[in-house]
Image: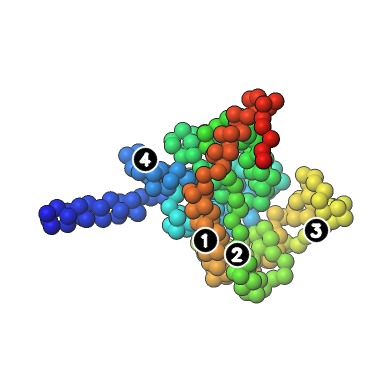
Amino acid sequence: MKKLIFSLILVCCALNLNAQQLPAAWEELTASDFPAAVKNAQGVCLIPMGVLEKHGPHLPLGTDVYTARELCFRAAHLEYCIVFPFYFAGQIFEAQQQPGTVAYSPDLLYRLLDETCHEIARNGIKKIILVNGHGGNNAFLQYFCQTQLATPRDYAVFSISPATDPNTQEIITAMRKTDFDGHAGEVETSTILAIRPDLVQLQKATSESGEDLNQLPLKKEFPSLQTGIWWYAQFPNHYAGDAKDAQAALGELALASRSKTLADLIKAVKEDQNTLCLQETFFIERKQPLQTKIKP
């Protein structure tokens, strides 16, 4: 009996070890391990989203996806889930004048993401989190999430741009050497220094201006005004700030905080029972709106 119990313990330990050792990266999983990964992830998959665009004169074109994927893998280490491969089909029309930009047409952007989500769900994953690493995707992803109600589906899509917690943000602000920081600036450059220092050419950081040229006073006068050319009017060099004082330690702080925020979300999404239930109710009610009962 003791030998049997001991053998069972060893088997259980082996199973737990195997579960822990499953890769988070979708492309690294074998087909035979994939069902176990879905179960271990409790049906949650992250899509790290960015674009291919200029990041000043010193950072790689894939900066946003490198950052998004790093956040996803760090979060998956804390709260296991599956991480979809490098996804760079995002909204980036405002950078088409810069070398290396890849800007797909609006309908293709939408269809590709929609079909990607459909395929992820077809593989048994019913909770998909879009992890955005690119500011130009914000409006697109908000619209995409809202249009999930256009047709019935058995999965839910969430979107987040993981933020730094307030306490860490205070430390980062105190560490920063620059007053103005934005696209390819001190913090973003510090982040890539922490992820892929081999791709950062910091000596080039001062070769171009990252100043706000303010060529659209109308936008300054009416901040909520929307027009497509606003980014080009302010930062035609696709650089906002000054990255010369970037440091990996600052980037590491930002990554640790943001990945913890994402891990907390993954855990909450795993536990969430409301979203899919509410969607199902909505899809039933939308067929016969005149029979929809007023909720108490």
Report the quarter where the N terminus lies.
bottom left
Q: Position of residue 275 (x, y in %)?
A: 56, 42
Report the quarter where the C terminus lies.
top right
Indicate which disc, 2 or 1, sits on the residue closer to the N terminus: 2
Indicate which disc, 2 or 3, sits on the residue closer to the N terminus: 2
Residue bearing the label numbered 1: 260
Task: Say if mark 2 contacts mark 1, CB within 8 Å.
Answer: yes
Indicate which disc, 4 or 2, sits on the residue closer to the N terminus: 4
Amino acid of disc 4: Pro
Residue at image position (59%, 29%) is 284
Residue bearing the label numbered 2: 165
Mark 3 crowdedness (10 Å alpha carbons): few <14, some 14-19, many ≥20: some
Judged by depth in the image, the label closer to the viewer, 4 or 3, is 4
Q: From this viewpoint, is residue 108 visible?
A: no
Q: From this viewpoint, is residue 159 visible?
A: yes
Task: Say if mark 4 contacts mark 3, CB within 8 Å.
Answer: no
Task: Say if mark 4 contacts mark 1, CB within 8 Å.
Answer: no
Indicate which disc, 1 or 3, sits on the residue closer to the N terminus: 3
Residue bearing the label numbered 4: 35
Amino acid of disc 2: Asp
Amino acid of disc 3: Leu
Indicate which disc, 4 or 1, sits on the residue closer to the N terminus: 4
Residue bearing the label numbered 3: 213
Mark 2 to mark 3: distance in Å?
31 Å
Q: Position of residue 232 (x, y in %)?
A: 76, 50
Between 203 and 105, the residue placed more toward the observer is: 105
In the displayed orientation, state which residue is furthest to the front: 296
